Every structure is written in C-alpha cells, then in structure tokens.
Amino acid sequence: MKQITATGQSVDEAVESALAQLNTTKDRTEIVIIDEGKKGIFGIFGSKPAVVKVTLKPDPVEETAAFLQKTVDSMGVTATIEISRNGKNVTFNLSGEKLAILIGKRGQTLNSLQYLTQLVMNRYSNQYLNVMIDAENYRGRREETLTQLAERLAAKAVRTRQDVPLEPMPSYERKVIHTALINNKKVKTFSSGTDPNRHIVISPNR
C-alpha cells in the first residue's frame, strides 16, 4: 500500500502534490489532513505549510488477480491470468497446463474458486463487482451442455407430466437453464431450496 506525506501552501496544494507523486487521482486515495497550515502575515511572515497524508487505495481487480494467482500456484498449477472487464462484470480467463485440476468435476472446483475470488473482490471494492472465472473456455462448453440438458429434461417433464428437479447449481448456471426454456410454452422453470443446494425445477404447464 503506497502512502505519502506532502506539504503545500494550502491543503489543496498539498493534496495535488501528493497525487502527482503517486501518479493517481483523488477518488483512488484516502486523504488525512495532518495540519491545515497557516498563511501568516501578508501571506509570508509566520506562515506554516499544510501537511497531508495520502494513501493509495488498493485496486480491487489487481488485488483479486494476485489472490487468484497465489491460489492457483498453491494448487500446483501453472496458469496465466488474462483479465477483461465490462462495467461491473470482471472475467479472469485462465490458460496453461493441467487446468482440469482447477475445473474439477462438472466445474465444482472452478465454481468454488470463483466464489472465493468474488468474496475477495468485494472486500476491496466499494461497489459490487460480479466475478467470472473461466478456464479453456469451460464456461462456454458448460453452457452448451446445460442448454441441451434443459431441452432434454423439459421434454421429459412434458412426457411424464411430472416436475423434474435438477442438481444444485450456482446462480449463473441456473440462469442458463431459465433462459434456455423461457420460450418453451409447454413448461415453466423455478428455483427451489437455498444455497448451496438451490436448484432448478422444470414443471409441465398443466
């Protein structure tokens, strides 16, 4: 965490000096006024400079990327992290070898890693940011699998006239199921249970 103490003829000047030295903007810092200073007679005699302490706030994306890299390394996997951001959505794309270890069965390890990373991100950020972690385009392949599963189980619900519950899924996977069947007039979908056991139920329209 970078921190600097700066002086100036006024508090504003001291702050500007500190921001210039840190090469940052005011919104990315925390400012503490140590001494407001004193102008003195005719602005010269008996004057006292203003003193401020300016601390650079940690960048939430950079801090989260560092946490993710450290976690991946501790799992014995060599991976490169590429970061992309779109508004409040931040995606960490992992590339390298042995990524199957990070993905796990049906993406369970990847989902757990994403959950932890989400917590870290929002500990550092003053606004909610949504985190997605992908590896070898697993998310895209998983979405295709879930869409096919949704269509198959919807047909089963219509055929048997019975509700069909799916396995527990994270919220974004449940959204894939909902979206896949939103135009299917023969069934409706709803979520049931509480996390981490919250799951989708496909129900035939009666």
Image (cartoon, rainbow, N blue to C red):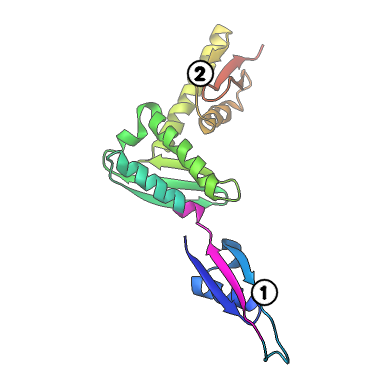
Q: Nearer the viewer, mark 2 or mark 1?
A: 1
Which quadrant is home to the C terminus?
A: top right
Give residue 47's position: percent from left, percent from top.
66, 86
In terms of depth relative to the viewer, which is nearer, 76 or 191? 76
Query: Which of disc 1 and disc 2 is earlier in sequence?
Result: 1
Which residue does the image show at 70% across and 87% down from the upper left? 40
Tag 2 residue: 166
Indicate which disc residue 110 carries: none
- In terms of image quadrants, where is residue 130? top right
* Residue 175 shows in the view: yes
- In terms of image quadrants, where is residue 25? bottom right
The amino acid on which the numbered mark 1 sits, given as a three-letter code, is Glu
- Say which element carries label 1: loop
In terms of depth relative to the viewer, which is nearer, 180 or 114? 114
Residue 54 part of the magenta segment: yes
Give residue 164's position: percent from left, percent from top.
54, 13
Q: Are marks 2 and 1 in contact (CB under 8 Å)?
A: no
Q: Residues within 10 Å of mark 1 (few under 14, many from 20)?
A: some
Indicate which disc residue 36 carries: 1
Which residue does the image show at 28% across and 45% down from the upper left? 78
Left or right: 58 in relation to 99: right
Distance (Cα) linking label 2 and label 1? 63 Å
- Which portion, as a residue range, is magenta? 47-62
Vertical order, 154 against 43 (above or below): above
